[in-house]
Amino acid sequence: MNAADEAITLLKKYGGAAYFGEPVSQLEHALQTAHFAVQAGSSRELVLAALLHDVGHLLVDPAESAADEGIDARHEIAGYDWLLSRFGELVAEPVRLHVPAKRYLCRTNPAYLSRLSPASVRSLELQGGPFTEEEAREFESHSFFREALRLRSWDDEAKIPGMVVAPLEAYEWLWRA
Ligand code: FE
Protein backbone atom coordinates (compact mmCIF):
# COMPACT_ATOMS: atom_id res chain seq x y z
CA MET A 1 0.00 0.00 0.00
CA ASN A 2 1.32 3.47 -0.74
CA ALA A 3 1.26 6.28 1.81
CA ALA A 4 -1.92 7.86 0.44
CA ASP A 5 -3.82 4.56 0.60
CA GLU A 6 -2.55 3.92 4.12
CA ALA A 7 -3.75 7.36 5.25
CA ILE A 8 -7.15 7.00 3.60
CA THR A 9 -7.59 3.54 5.12
CA LEU A 10 -6.84 4.86 8.61
CA LEU A 11 -9.22 7.81 8.23
CA LYS A 12 -12.00 5.53 7.06
CA LYS A 13 -11.33 2.69 9.47
CA TYR A 14 -11.39 4.67 12.68
CA GLY A 15 -12.85 7.90 11.36
CA GLY A 16 -16.29 7.14 12.78
CA ALA A 17 -14.94 7.02 16.31
CA ALA A 18 -15.80 9.90 18.60
CA TYR A 19 -13.24 12.68 18.80
CA PHE A 20 -12.46 12.64 22.50
CA GLY A 21 -15.22 14.38 24.34
CA GLU A 22 -16.15 16.56 21.33
CA PRO A 23 -19.44 16.54 19.39
CA VAL A 24 -17.84 15.36 16.10
CA SER A 25 -16.25 12.12 14.90
CA GLN A 26 -12.54 11.80 14.14
CA LEU A 27 -13.24 11.93 10.41
CA GLU A 28 -15.54 14.96 10.69
CA HIS A 29 -12.86 16.68 12.76
CA ALA A 30 -10.16 15.87 10.19
CA LEU A 31 -12.31 17.07 7.27
CA GLN A 32 -13.29 20.28 9.03
CA THR A 33 -9.65 21.02 9.88
CA ALA A 34 -8.67 20.45 6.24
CA HIS A 35 -11.60 22.60 5.13
CA PHE A 36 -10.33 25.57 7.15
CA ALA A 37 -6.81 25.02 5.80
CA VAL A 38 -8.10 25.12 2.21
CA GLN A 39 -10.18 28.22 2.96
CA ALA A 40 -7.05 29.95 4.24
CA GLY A 41 -5.29 29.26 0.93
CA SER A 42 -2.73 26.91 2.46
CA SER A 43 -0.06 24.92 0.65
CA ARG A 44 -0.76 21.31 -0.29
CA GLU A 45 1.55 20.19 2.53
CA LEU A 46 -0.29 22.22 5.14
CA VAL A 47 -3.69 20.94 3.98
CA LEU A 48 -2.29 17.41 4.27
CA ALA A 49 -1.04 18.24 7.76
CA ALA A 50 -4.51 19.53 8.67
CA LEU A 51 -6.25 16.44 7.34
CA LEU A 52 -3.82 14.10 9.09
CA HIS A 53 -2.91 16.07 12.23
CA ASP A 54 -4.55 13.52 14.51
CA VAL A 55 -3.37 10.43 12.63
CA GLY A 56 -1.48 9.50 15.80
CA HIS A 57 -4.85 8.84 17.42
CA LEU A 58 -5.85 6.59 14.52
CA LEU A 59 -2.73 4.45 14.71
CA VAL A 60 -4.12 2.85 17.84
CA ASP A 61 -7.52 1.22 18.12
CA PRO A 62 -9.76 3.96 19.58
CA ALA A 63 -11.25 1.41 21.96
CA GLU A 64 -7.83 1.09 23.57
CA SER A 65 -7.05 4.76 23.43
CA ALA A 66 -5.82 6.54 26.52
CA ALA A 67 -7.61 9.88 26.43
CA ASP A 68 -9.99 9.37 29.30
CA GLU A 69 -7.66 7.25 31.35
CA GLY A 70 -5.39 10.05 32.48
CA ILE A 71 -2.51 9.06 30.21
CA ASP A 72 -0.96 11.41 27.69
CA ALA A 73 -0.82 9.31 24.54
CA ARG A 74 1.57 11.77 22.85
CA HIS A 75 -0.39 11.43 19.65
CA GLU A 76 1.49 14.29 18.01
CA ILE A 77 4.77 12.36 18.26
CA ALA A 78 3.25 9.13 16.94
CA GLY A 79 1.71 11.16 14.12
CA TYR A 80 4.99 12.93 13.38
CA ASP A 81 6.94 9.67 13.15
CA TRP A 82 4.32 8.12 10.91
CA LEU A 83 4.05 11.18 8.63
CA LEU A 84 7.74 12.03 8.35
CA SER A 85 8.70 8.88 6.47
CA ARG A 86 5.63 9.04 4.23
CA PHE A 87 5.01 12.72 3.48
CA GLY A 88 8.14 14.60 4.63
CA GLU A 89 8.81 17.32 7.17
CA LEU A 90 6.58 20.02 5.66
CA VAL A 91 3.64 17.82 6.64
CA ALA A 92 5.10 16.17 9.74
CA GLU A 93 6.51 19.21 11.58
CA PRO A 94 3.30 21.23 11.93
CA VAL A 95 1.65 18.05 13.23
CA ARG A 96 4.38 17.50 15.82
CA LEU A 97 4.02 21.12 16.92
CA HIS A 98 0.23 21.35 17.11
CA VAL A 99 0.21 20.34 20.77
CA PRO A 100 3.10 22.65 21.79
CA ALA A 101 1.19 25.38 19.91
CA LYS A 102 -1.70 24.94 22.31
CA ARG A 103 0.65 25.17 25.31
CA TYR A 104 2.16 28.29 23.73
CA LEU A 105 -1.20 29.99 23.16
CA CYS A 106 -2.31 29.22 26.70
CA ARG A 107 0.77 31.09 27.90
CA THR A 108 0.62 34.06 25.56
CA ASN A 109 -3.11 34.57 25.03
CA PRO A 110 -5.34 34.52 28.14
CA ALA A 111 -8.49 34.63 25.98
CA TYR A 112 -7.37 31.44 24.25
CA LEU A 113 -7.34 29.43 27.45
CA SER A 114 -10.84 30.60 28.34
CA ARG A 115 -12.17 29.48 24.94
CA LEU A 116 -10.78 25.92 25.04
CA SER A 117 -13.34 23.13 25.14
CA PRO A 118 -13.58 21.14 28.40
CA ALA A 119 -11.96 18.11 26.74
CA SER A 120 -9.11 20.27 25.50
CA VAL A 121 -8.55 21.75 28.95
CA ARG A 122 -8.41 18.23 30.38
CA SER A 123 -5.82 17.11 27.82
CA LEU A 124 -3.79 20.31 28.36
CA GLU A 125 -2.92 19.12 31.85
CA LEU A 126 -1.75 15.77 30.50
CA GLN A 127 0.27 17.60 27.84
CA GLY A 128 2.25 19.55 30.41
CA GLY A 129 0.10 22.66 30.89
CA PRO A 130 0.85 26.16 29.55
CA PHE A 131 4.44 26.88 28.49
CA THR A 132 6.72 28.91 30.72
CA GLU A 133 7.81 32.30 29.36
CA GLU A 134 11.14 30.78 28.33
CA GLU A 135 9.51 27.84 26.57
CA ALA A 136 7.25 30.27 24.72
CA ARG A 137 10.21 32.34 23.44
CA GLU A 138 11.96 29.18 22.30
CA PHE A 139 8.85 28.00 20.48
CA GLU A 140 8.65 31.31 18.58
CA SER A 141 12.06 30.67 17.06
CA HIS A 142 11.02 27.36 15.52
CA SER A 143 10.97 27.44 11.71
CA PHE A 144 7.49 25.89 11.66
CA PHE A 145 6.11 28.24 14.33
CA ARG A 146 3.64 29.95 12.01
CA GLU A 147 2.37 26.76 10.43
CA ALA A 148 1.92 25.24 13.88
CA LEU A 149 -0.21 28.16 15.07
CA ARG A 150 -2.32 28.12 11.93
CA LEU A 151 -2.93 24.38 12.20
CA ARG A 152 -3.79 24.83 15.87
CA SER A 153 -6.41 27.48 15.10
CA TRP A 154 -8.12 25.24 12.52
CA ASP A 155 -7.93 22.26 14.88
CA ASP A 156 -9.65 24.27 17.61
CA GLU A 157 -12.38 25.42 15.22
CA ALA A 158 -13.06 22.00 13.75
CA LYS A 159 -15.54 20.76 16.33
CA ILE A 160 -18.77 21.94 14.77
CA PRO A 161 -21.57 19.33 14.87
CA GLY A 162 -23.21 18.77 11.48
CA MET A 163 -21.04 21.22 9.56
CA VAL A 164 -21.19 20.45 5.85
CA VAL A 165 -17.70 20.20 4.35
CA ALA A 166 -16.10 18.48 1.36
CA PRO A 167 -15.84 14.67 1.77
CA LEU A 168 -12.58 12.73 1.83
CA GLU A 169 -13.01 11.98 -1.89
CA ALA A 170 -12.65 15.69 -2.65
CA TYR A 171 -9.01 15.50 -1.55
CA GLU A 172 -7.80 13.29 -4.40
CA TRP A 173 -5.54 16.14 -5.55
CA LEU A 174 -3.74 16.10 -2.20
CA TRP A 175 -2.29 12.65 -2.62
CA ARG A 176 -0.77 13.29 -6.03
CA ALA A 177 2.46 15.17 -5.72
FE1 FE B 1 -7.34 17.74 16.41
Image: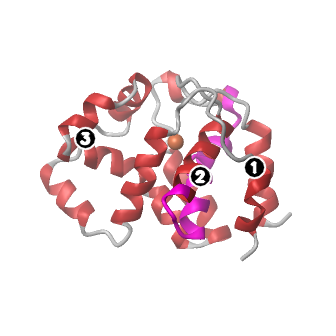
What's the amino acid at mark 1? Leu
Q: Position of residue 67 (x, y in %)?
A: 52, 28
Query: Residue 120 vs residue 108: left or right?
Result: right
Q: Is residue 45 above or below residue 64?
A: below
The mark nearer the N terminus, 3 or 2, is 2
Residue reaching furthest to the right: 1
Residue at the (53%, 56%) spot, across then down = 39
What's the amino acid at mark 2? Ala
Q: Is residue 97 visible?
A: yes
The mark nearer the N terminus, 2 or 1, is 2
Can you identify the residue that label 3 sits on?
A: 106
Q: Secondary structure at mark 2?
A: helix
What's the amino acid at mark 3? Cys
Can you identify the residue that label 1 sits on?
A: 168
Q: Is residue 97 above or below residue 11?
A: below
Residue range in magenta is: 39-63
Q: Is residue 52 visible?
A: no
Callout 1 crowding tier (Cα within 10 Å): few <14, some 14–19, many ≥20 = some
Can you identify the residue that label 2 sits on?
A: 34
What secondary structure characterizes most of the magenta part? helix
